[in-house]
Amino acid sequence: DTAVSQTPKYLVTQMGNDKSIKCEQNLGHDTMYWYKQDSKKFLKIMFSYNNKELIINETVPNRFSPKSPDKAHLNLHINSLELGDSAVYFCASSQTPGQGLEQYFGPGTRLTVT
Amino acid sequence: SQQGEEDPQALSIQEGENATMNCSYKTSINNLQWYRQNSGRGLVHLILIRSNEREKHSGRLRVTLDTSKKSSSLLITASRAADTASYFCATDPLRGGTSYGKLTFGQGTILTVHP
């Protein structure tokens, strides 16, 4: 009965590879987010989708492409991985943020690029 | 740019003591939220305080917000070893009177509660 789940939990890959992280929420929320947490624990928003529509797209390299097949899923595809992409990536969801609501986070995916 | 900044960066206390963490931010906000992150886990929402509120309570948590000083504090009373975690404030900025859920997080306060 996990609310926000991510797969995989750990991802170790070499520079130049392409990888995807999947996220699913069963809370009935219509907005989903991707965050990146660096080694200093600094958490920064990358993307947000509301009802499959991109509403937040921060300054993120084009190598990162989110895809939302439906409002319960938001996947993150990363092309040509670089060392600096190593981080923990968190997916989150919320109801429509217009009223300012809390976000529910997944357990994170620790990406290590070697 | 980083919106919220927590102070202190690390706090070590004994069980039963109170823990106070502070957060400062730079722009107008819709609301401010506090989250907890246990080691190796995702963030868990603790409490949300809106810009027109000054104080809010939830169990052993008390949050204050001073929009004139652009600061907030989180007080955890009667701390327990299980409260050991990183605590983050996150601001939901105001844009045209609407929230887009674009939370901006500080770097967090690492709280250690010794049994």
Image: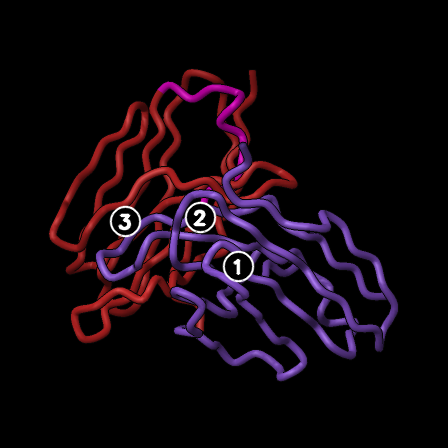
On the rendered structure, is B49 left or right of B8? left
**Residue stretch in magenta:** B78-87
Q: CA distance from mark 2 to mark 1?
A: 9 Å
Disc 3 vs disc 2: which is toward the camera? 2
- Element marked by disc 2: strand
Please determine if labels 2 and 1 lie on a single subunit.
no
Q: Colour of chain A?
A: purple
Residue that numbered label 1 is attached to: A43
Q: Colour of chain B?
A: red
Is there any visible trace of residue B7 in the rendered image?
no
Q: Which dot, 1 or 3, sits closer to the camera?
A: 1
Q: Residue at x 52, y 25 (%)?
A: B113
What's the distance in space between the residues labelled 3 and 2, CA to CA? Answer: 11 Å
Q: Which residue is mark 3?
A: B72
> Which residue is identified by label 2?
B88
Picture residue at 31% right of the left edge, 66% below the top: B100
Residue at coordinates 36% horizontally, 36% vertically from top-left?
Answer: B20
- The kind of residue on which mark 3 rests is Ser
Question: Does mark 3 fall on the same chain as mark 1?
Answer: no
Q: Residue furthest left?
A: B52
Q: Nearer the viewer, residue A74 or B27?
A: A74
